[in-house]
Every structure is written in structure tokens, then in C-alpha cells.
Image (cartoon, rainbow, N blue to C red):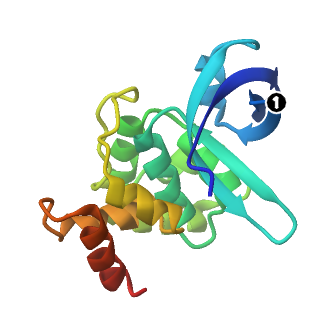
Amino acid sequence: MISYLEGKIIFKKDKFIILNIAGVGYKVFLSKKTLSIIPEIGKDVKLFCFTDVKENAIDIYGFLNPRQLDFFEILDSIRGVGPKAALEISSLGSLEEIKEKVLAKDENLFSKIPGIGKKKAMTIILELTGKIREIDTRSAFAEATADEAEDALVNLGFARQKAKLALKNIPQNLAAEERIKQALKLLGK
């Protein structure tokens, strides 16, 4: 799985960019908000990524920091919300604004997203209410804390949020390999 990309922007469209990394072009879907703040064509950019593998395609979704990626993964885990809708939802505002509206049960939050009516909006809000409290809404450009065990679990295909939750119950002073083994037991693998 592709979890991080760093390269030169060689093409920009209204929903994606193409990054040149060692002569290979990667098409990376970005939210409208992210597209509006990334550098122009010819400049370098660093993105944390979610790879969506389907039968006939592999799509990559890019984010400026791990918190945005975590939020996207939580949205994508909700039944009926796919990666494209999750990307649209994640561009509705800052994490703090979205969190505030979800906790206030504001179903109008999703009114601008095609395919999400009032019933689906309420379902999303209900599922997000419990999960969104876990999201750290500090500055959108804060640096990630390196956790080798967490990265390994993500590379094995687990959502970052699930990996974090599993590792939360395991002592930090253990070796990374031992933490991974114990987390896999908790995750049922």
C-alpha cells in the first residue's frame, strides 16, 4: 500500500494532481480545500496517502497531514460512504468545524454533497459522533509522531485509526515487533 508520496507536481486538475516521483506519474485525488493550498505546478509536495484497491483500479487519495488522513479513514469506514464521498466530506471545512457540526448533529453539513440526503446524513452523523472525539484536531500542519508499530499495521492493511486504538492498549516500552504481534491478536489476525 502507498502511504506517503513526495514529488513534483506536473499536472493539476479540479479533483486530482499528478506527481512525478523518479520518473513515474502518480495520480492522486485531493479534496478541493487541499487543491486550493498546495503549491503550483513544478513545485514539490509531500502527501500522506490512502490507497483504495478495487477490482479494476487502484486510486490514491492524498492529505497534507496524518490527522486529515485519519479523518478520511474514519469517514471511509462508515457504511454507504465511499472514498470519493469521504473526500468531499473532508473538504467541507477544517477538522474542528466539521467536528463541531457533527457533535451538534447538524445534518445540513452534508447538504452540498451529491448522493447524501437527510437520512444518510443522520446515519453518518450518528456513526461519526462516537468516532470523531478520537480525532486530534490540532493544527492541520502539525507533524506526525513516528510509531513504527502503527505504520507496520497500516502497511498490513489496517486503517490508521484501528491501528492506533489497538496499540493504545499495549505498553509503549515493548519492542515494535512485540507491539505489532499483540496488536494483531487484538485485531483478530
Position of residue 88 measured from the top left corner of the image (x, y, whole percent): 64, 44
Q: Residue at x 46, y 41 (%)?
A: 68
Position of residue 30 measured from the top left corner of the image (x, y, whole percent): 67, 37
Query: Toward the viewer: 113 or 173?
Result: 173
For label 1, the residue is: 23
Q: Residue at x 38, y 60 (%)?
A: 161
Position of residue 48 measured from the top left corner of the image (x, y, whole percent): 53, 40
Q: Residue at x 64, y 18 (%)?
A: 44
- Amino acid type of the residue that numbered disc 1 sits on in the rendered structure: Gly
Is residue 103 among the parts visible in the rendering?
A: yes
Instruction: Look at the picture and state if 45 lies above or below 71.
Output: above
Position of residue 25 measured from the top left corner of the image (x, y, whole percent): 82, 35
Residue 80 figure quarter: bottom right
Answer with left or right where residue 15 lies relative to residue 88: right
Location of the C terminus by quadrant is: bottom left
Is residue 129 among the parts visible in the rendering?
A: no
**Secondary structure at numbered mark 1:** loop
Q: Residue at x 32, y 50 (%)?
A: 135
Location of the N terminus by quadrant is: bottom right
Query: Toward the viewer: 2 or 164?
Result: 2
Instruction: Look at the picture and state if 2 lies above or below 176.
Output: above
Q: Furthest residue to the right?
A: 56
